């Protein structure tokens, strides 16, 4: 007779939290990369890009371990596909942080001082989105123990609302910054293209963070 442990398998939620923490290590590198861009420090940017790639690879390894803990016969308190989507969107965040670091190494750009504030405001807001998302993800294991209901679930729903609001704020900052650099007559077209790509990567990080939050909200609301 199969044991209950064998029947229920190993929980994927603790590894999900571990993966979320590693993804956040990637997100934490976007500010140093942004500072390297503004300083024109190509050597530092190459170092950061290698560090980002290594951290993203480590996140990929953790992602694979989580997937190995999602056998079709595992009994979950939520839909298996929701857990898989949560993991996939977290993975996209790590991918986009790596894209940001790679784009930063493509060409040294000279950003006018008056544009620095708008760029860093966007970077910092995206980082805040990532921090808030990590705070949400840290509750996953406890939510599983409580079957995604109760006071902790209600608190997580409030935190998810905060993540979504911050993503909206990052969208506004991205549009404002884009208007500023497109309006600058001294910027060459290649610099504008690179700025567009950098902003797109930042926007994608925030978008996927919001998607992770919304997916977790569905897990809770479907209980």
Image: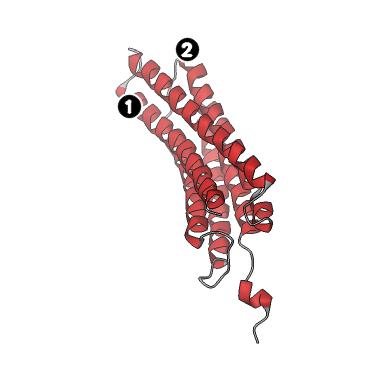
> Is residue 160 toward the left or the right of residue 112 in the image?
right
Q: Give x and y (percent) for residue 23.
A: 57, 46
Q: Secondary structure at mark 2?
A: helix
Residue beneath the point at 52% across and 17% down? 117
Q: Give x and y (percent) for residue 64.
A: 53, 62
Foreground: 86 or 7?
Answer: 7
Q: Give x and y (percent) for residue 208.
A: 47, 42
In the picture, the quarter occupied by the N terminus is bottom right
Disc with the residue nearer the chain's start (2 vs 1)? 2
Q: Residue furthest bottom?
A: 1
Mark 2 vs mark 1: give the one in front. 2
Residue beneath the point at 62% across and 76% down? 7
Crowding around mark 1 (Cα neighbors within 10 Å: few <14, some 14 to 19, many 20+) is few
Q: Give x and y (percent) for residue 88.
A: 48, 53
Q: Secondary structure at mark 1?
A: helix
Residue that badge 1 annotates: 190
> Is residue 142 toward the left or the right of residue 86 in the image?
right
Residue beneath the point at 59% across and 41% down? 157
Residue beneath the point at 55% across and 35% down? 161
Residue that badge 2 annotates: 114
Residue 131: image quadrant is top right
The colour scheme of the drawn protein is secondary structure
Q: Is any atom of residue 156 visible in this view?
A: yes
The answer to the question of whether label 2 and label 1 lie on touching residues, with beta carbons closer than 8 A, is no
Indicate whether 104 appears above or below 55. above
> Marks 2 and 1, how far apart in space?
19 Å
In the picture, the quarter occupied by the C terminus is bottom right
């Amino acid at each position: 007779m199969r044991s209950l442990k064998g029947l229920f398998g190993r929980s994927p939620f603790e590894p999900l939290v571990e993966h979320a923490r590693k993804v956040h290590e990637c997100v934490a590198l976007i500010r140093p990369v942004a500072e390297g861009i503004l300083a024109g420090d190509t050597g530092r940017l190459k170092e950061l890009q290698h560090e980002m790639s290594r951290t993203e690879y480590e996140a990929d390894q953790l992602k694979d371990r989580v997937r190995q803990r999602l056998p079709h016969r595992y009994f979950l308190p939520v839909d298996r596909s929701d857990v898989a989507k949560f993991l996939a969107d977290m993975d996209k965040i790590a991918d986009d942080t790596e894209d940001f670091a790679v784009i930063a190494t493509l060409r040294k750009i000279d950003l006018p001082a008056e544009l620095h504030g708008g760029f860093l405001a966007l970077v910092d807001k995206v980082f805040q989105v990532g921090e808030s998302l990590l705070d949400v993800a840290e509750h996953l294991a406890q939510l599983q123990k409580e079957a995604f209901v109760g006071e902790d679930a209600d608190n997580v729903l409030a935190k998810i609302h905060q993540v979504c609001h911050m993503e909206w704020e990052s969208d506004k900052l991205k549009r404002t910054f884009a208007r500023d650099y497109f309006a600058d007559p001294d910027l060459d077209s290649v610099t504008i293209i690179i700025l567009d790509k950098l902003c797109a990567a930042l926007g994608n990080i925030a978008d996927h963070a919001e998607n992770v939050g919304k997916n977790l909200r569905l897990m809770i609301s479907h209980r």
